Image (cartoon, grey):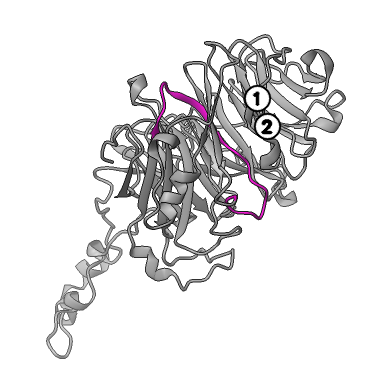
Amino acid sequence: MSKRPAEASSSTQTIDGQPFAKAGPNASKREIEGSNEMGEFEDAWEDEVEEDEDVVDNAEKDEDGMDIDEVIPAVEDREEPTPAPKPYIPGLHTLGQDEELEADESVYHMRHTMRVNWPCLSFDVLKDNLGDERRRFPATVSIVAGTQAADMNKNEVVVYKMSSLHKTQRDGDNSDSDGEDDDDDDALDEDPIIEFRSIKHFGGVNRIRAQPLPPSTGLPPVSQPYFVASWAETGKVHIWDVRPLMESMEVPGYTYDKAHASTPAFTVNSHGRAEGFAMDWAASGPSSLRLLTGDIHSKIYLTTSTPTGFNALSQPFTSHTSSVEDIQWSPSEPTVFSSCSADRTVQIWDVRSKGRKSVAAIDPAHESDVNVISWNRLSSYLLLSGGDEGGIKVWDLRNIKKSGCWHPFSWHQAPITSVEWHPTEDSIFAASGADNQVTLWDLAVEQDADEAGMDDTPEGGKDIPSQLLFQHLGQKDVKEIHWHPQIPGTVISTASDGFNVFKTFNV
């Protein structure tokens, strides 16, 4: 991707859709060299031929004098069947010197990769006006991301539009389970396209979140802004209106004031110089926007919208004793939110409570730092958390003191970096870890009765959980994942080497 100017800019380029070197999602391992050497078979008729050489000599030609070996190859010349690739399981298998991972494209409905100038620790999905429940291809995806450039002055907030995202697989055994039309097969050979607009951002972006929009609605009217908040490493939280940037990629000939778009609509200075990572918008209408931000000094601040702009409240929420790592508003209670921290706890809060203290706590929630949480938007009593020890836990908030963790999962081999519930399936969630894995899970899956008691553990390894639907490999240092709310089953992930957009046949 070509270098962008620091000011708001645009470009159109082709997305690199090839697998990453040395890795591939849902991969199998194969030999780089020497894997196709032919084996040799023993001649089953060798003894008989030696005993009756005259018969063989007379039979070597048919009635027309044709050499039979030209029609039927000798046994030793026949090709040996190619062995089936071995599945690769992180933590169990290691790559040899002559091996690399090879992506199994047959399990993907769609898979594309995008490389960027600077790594993005965080991004969020932007809603568009193309409709919900989109199942036809090619697909279009819009996201907003914040960079982590080597120089603080070179960072940006970037709005990407990825279009012409075609199917990965033309034909095969996997049928289109979603009932999508095959009329768009001609789009399979089109090159995916990326367009973007960027604005300057002083300091790296630790986390970025887009204003939530009501379900079954597209962008707000042109007269209304579309806000995005960025947590800067400088300790400031900036609120931007990215609506003009999106419109400039949707409407031919659309122009906007670049200087105005590059100026934050509001800046939260409540945290002083303390940077942070925790941030979440309340899922409410544009007339009552509320933004929570948590810093490394254990403080959480609330910023609300007013008829004339935004107002940052000065009194913090203070029950954590270490860095606040993540925040989530309740999907069903407008005044309730949850947070997690390096103090190993998950706290539940009500903004109406006096003293700005939490009203409930899971202590400890994990063996070490609790890095991320996600509140189930369909079953609001379920809360998901991921810890530094690599564990994932599902909490039933109705019985949190009596039964504790409802369901723990131990699969990842490194800290969990992101978790998120599926937007329309309350039993499915996605997770990512510092072990370079993105995993998809389904709580509704249980071990078959016929399999109970059977040992299906790989030799030298551990049990593969029944709820583990899929593992996506190929990225390095995965930082964040999100489901696309308008394209069912589509996952977007960011890592040190760029973005992946994929949809599997499993979800």
Q: Position of residue 30 (x, y in %)?
A: 34, 44
Q: Nearer the viewer, residue 182 or 7?
A: 7
For disc 2, the marked residue is: 306
Q: Nearer the viewer, residue 410 or 115?
A: 115
Q: Is residue 393 visible?
A: no
Q: Secondary structure at mark 2?
A: strand
Amino acid type assigned to the residue bearing label 2 in the image: Thr
**Is residue 349 shown above or below 3?**
above
| Principal secondary structure, stretch drawn in magenta | loop
Q: Position of residue 371 (x, y in %)?
A: 60, 23
**Are the residues flagged by discs 1 and 2 in contact, CB closer than 8 Å?**
yes
Q: Position of residue 376 (x, y in %)?
A: 72, 39
Q: Report the residue at 69% width, 35% height from top.
A: 282
Q: Earlier in the sequence, mark 1 or mark 2?
A: 2
Mark 1, other Cα within 10 Å: few <14 / some 14–19 / many ≥20: some
Q: Position of residue 125 (x, y in %)?
A: 53, 43
Q: Secondary structure at mark 1?
A: strand
Splitting the image into 4 quarters, where does residue 178 fall?
Answer: bottom right
Of the 4 image quadrants, the one containing the N terminus is top left
Q: Which mark is residue 311?
A: 1
Q: Which residues are magenta?
A: 199-220
